[in-house]
Image (cartoon, helix red, strand yellow):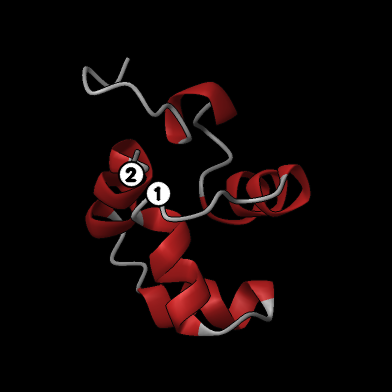
Amino acid sequence: MACLNLRGEMARKRISIEDMSAFLGIHRNSVTNKLNGVCAFSIDESMKIQEEFFPDLELKYLFNQNEKGG
């Protein structure tokens, strides 16, 4: 499943897929695949994303893959 909360927070903070790609050092298509749930972010990637872009939000919230989002 897609990381809907992460996508929503990226939109709120105007963080692009290209921004995330450059920060993680991976291709933008890889970031897109991970956001869409084709494959998963590694624990390391998840922690880096949370610490750099969303220090005020919990990992559990950002990477929740339930449709309800909470």
Q: Which residue occupies the extreme right position in the image?
A: 44
Residue at disc 2, secondary structure: loop
Query: x, y percentage for residue 11?
Result: 24, 58
Which disc is residue 15 wearing? Answer: none
Query: x, y percentage for residue 36?
Result: 33, 55
Query: x, y percentage for residue 54?
Result: 51, 45
- Residue tagged 2: 2
> Would you say the residues marked 2 and 1 are in contact, meaning their CB atoms lie under 8 Å apart?
yes
Q: Earlier in the sequence, mark 2 or mark 1?
A: 2
Instruction: Classify the position of the N terminus by image quarter.
Output: top left
Mark 2 closeness class: few <14, some 14–19, many ≥20 residues within 10 Å: many
State the residue at coordinates (45%, 34%). 62
Which disc is residue 37 wearing? Answer: 1
Residue at disc 1, secondary structure: loop
**Amino acid at the residue labelled 1:** Gly
**Closer-to-camera residue (67/16):** 67
Residue 37 falls left or right of residue 60: left
Vertical placement of residue 5 versus 37, above or below: above
State the residue at coordinates (42%, 55%). 38
